[in-house]
Amino acid sequence: MASEQIADGAQIASGAIPESPDAPQNVALSAPIPASSINWAAVGWFAVLLIAVYFPILRKLFDQWMTDDDVTHGVLVPPVALFIAWQRRDKIMAIAWKPAWWGLALLVWGAAQAYLGVVGAELFLQRTAFLISLVGMLLVMGGTKLVKELAFPLCLLPFMIPLPTVIYNKITFPLQLFASRVAETTLDTVGIPVFRDGNILELANQKLSVAEACSGIRSLLSLTFMSLVYAYVFDRRIWMRWVLLGCTIPIAIIANAGRVAITGILASYNPDLAEGLFHEMEGFVIFAIACVMLITIHALFRWVTSIRTMEEPNFD
């Protein structure tokens, strides 16, 4: 008996306290669920099921990406969003996956909206219903923390959905008129006679119509998406994303107006330059110039903020 007491005292003195069978064993319950504990089979099943349910809607969306020049950038949106989500995989694995069952309400909402969209032949309702159901599925599987961690790639996904026709027409027509006015002013300035009737420019040898394809909406949507991805990759400051996003609007509008003006100047000398392959290549060049303008603005902001940081007094 005395030897057992001496042994117990030695264990206590050395810090090796014997475990009690009644000691609580749930200390690690609040720790994040490790990746090995996540039911990846269920995750894959839910993903396949969601895609299968919305496959007819997604197939029509893909067909529009392939045929509509205004939304050709949409085919890049899902791969880019998946790549960004993959880059955040370590943080996604580290969070605790706790299902938020109110995500079922979003799944029901998405299903109801998709049904109404199919019945009413409204493509925008159908396609946005997929995004609603996607968020609902993520909430049911991983909870609000998972959705918060995937917030940025989820915010990119609406760029893959074409605008409703009503909103599209409300945006494009004012852009057409603005580009026509800028082209008219530019042509008058360089001494080329022109008469403008709405979005139609009448030159001495040709009549140019600033159509919807020349409104700049194509470059505006593409440049907006590109600005968010660019800011995410090269500048993680949230406010910089908003700044670059705001800068894309005037950049795209001004660049497109310049394209129309250049087309008018070239058409006054050779009408064939206002259409065909040369006209398409001109659009790519103008878009590249707009991208350079965006990168230049970002560099200027970084330079200004770096100067302000250097000028701040250090009291350490």
Image (tube, rainbow, N blue to C red):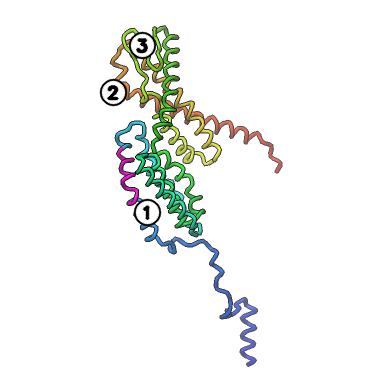
* In this rendering, the label closer to the viewer, 2 or 1: 1
Q: Across the whole image, how many numbered discs are drawn on residues? A: 3
Q: Which residues are magenta?
A: 52-63
Mark 3 or mark 1, earlier in chain: 1
Compared with 138, 168 (above or below) is above
Q: Nearer the viewer, residue 107 or 140?
A: 107
Q: Nearer the viewer, residue 237 or 280?
A: 280
Check disc 2 and give the amino acid type: Leu
* Disc assigned to residue 224: none
Distance from Cα at disc 3 to Cα at disc 2: 22 Å
Name the residue beneath numbered marker 2.
Answer: 277
Location of the N terminus (image quadrant)? bottom right
Mark 2 or mark 1, earlier in chain: 1
Distance from Cα at disc 2 to Cα at disc 1: 42 Å
Element marked by disc 1: helix
Name the residue beneath numbered marker 1.
Answer: 47
Check disc 3 and give the amino acid type: Glu
Location of the C terminus (image quadrant)? top right
Q: Residue at x 56, y 38 (%)?
A: 239
Q: Is residue 51 magenta?
A: no
Q: Residue at x 32, y 17 (%)?
A: 274
Q: In this rendering, would 316 be left or right of 160?
A: right
